[in-house]
Amino acid sequence: NAGVMQNPRHLVRRRGQEARLRCSPMKGHSHVYWYRQLPEEGLKFMVYLQKENIIDESGMPKERFSAEFPKEGPSILRIQQVVRGDSAAYFCASSPRKAGGQNTEAFFGQGTRLTVV
Amino acid sequence: AQSVTQLDSQVPVFEEAPVELRCNYSSSVSVYLFWYVQYPNQGLQLLLKYLSGSTLVESINGFEAEFNKSQTSFHLRKPSVHISDTAEYFCAVSAGAAGNKLTFGGGTRVLVKP
């Protein structure tokens, strides 16, 4: 069972370009979470998705950022018109469907390091 | 809403010495508690977790953490560190109704010196 797969591992974009970050959750996991880690800071929650639904996007910037988790294929975090301040590591995590209300752990991918030049 | 405070941003420690990383949280609901480790240029790996039951939890590589509800703490300890324990350690909490959304502390960087 492969872990959470993120690609690319490193992404360089010029200011104004679009960045697309992909996340394939672990097999059988239907919950996906995106986090951002700015340099010298901890991880900050961005968005929580289930298949075809955005459940909680309270951590997403109001503009330029969007996320989706289609019925088929990976989850995508899309950043339009990137700026230098978007440079960060973006981590995806997945978890299985909750069983009986018991909260379970999230498994993290290795992240995509975005550099805006 | 939850918040997590890791009081020490960096902890230098000599090899084979003990280490304690402090973590305090605040929450209006019951929480689940986690410690993650991040090695340089890597993703996060779960070190240990508290969901319910015994308040003392242990990892396979010698770390342990104790959930103290009255002090709202979940400090991480290891009695004897190795060079390979050099990494950044993150404390995190989640509340059941919010799914697995994690709130992280700012991290503690552990540097083990020979």
Image (cartoon, coloured by chain):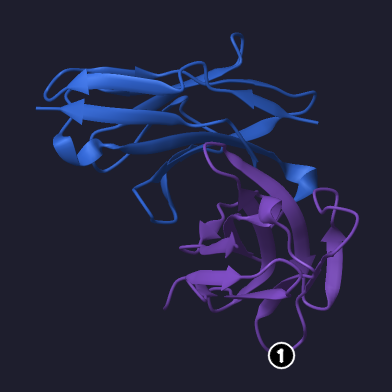
The answer to whether residue B101 is seen in the rendering is no
For the residue marked with disc 1, what is the amino acid?
Glu
**Residue at image coords 70%, 48%:** A45
The answer to whether residue A96 is seen in the rendering is yes
Percent position of residue B49, x then y: 48, 39
Q: Is residue A78 above or below residue B109?
A: below
Specify the quadrant that holds the N terminus of chain B.
top right
Secondary structure beneath disc 1? loop
Specify the quadrant that holds the C terminus of chain B.
top left
Mark 1 sits on what residue?
A: A72
**Chain ID, purple in image:** A
Percent position of residue A83, x then y: 73, 58
Quadrant of the rendered image containing residue B102: top right
Percent position of residue B34, x then y: 51, 38
**Residue at image coords 20%, 29%:** B112
Q: Is residue A74 above or below residue A66?
A: below
B102 or A18, which lies in front? A18
Q: Residue furthest bottom?
A: A72
Q: Is residue A51 left or right of residue B4?
A: right
**Residue at image coords 46%, 28%:** B54
Percent position of residue A3, x then y: 45, 71
Quadrant of the rendered image containing residue B96: top right
Q: Is residue A80 above or below residue A38?
A: below
Quadrant of the rendered image containing residue A79: bottom right
Q: Is residue A15 left or right of residue B56?
A: right
A106 or A100, which lies in front? A106
**Residue at image coords 85%, 61%:** A55
Specify the colour of chain B.
Answer: blue
Classed neighbour count for the residue bearing mark 1: other residues with Cα under 10 Å, few (<14), some (14–19), many (≥20)? few
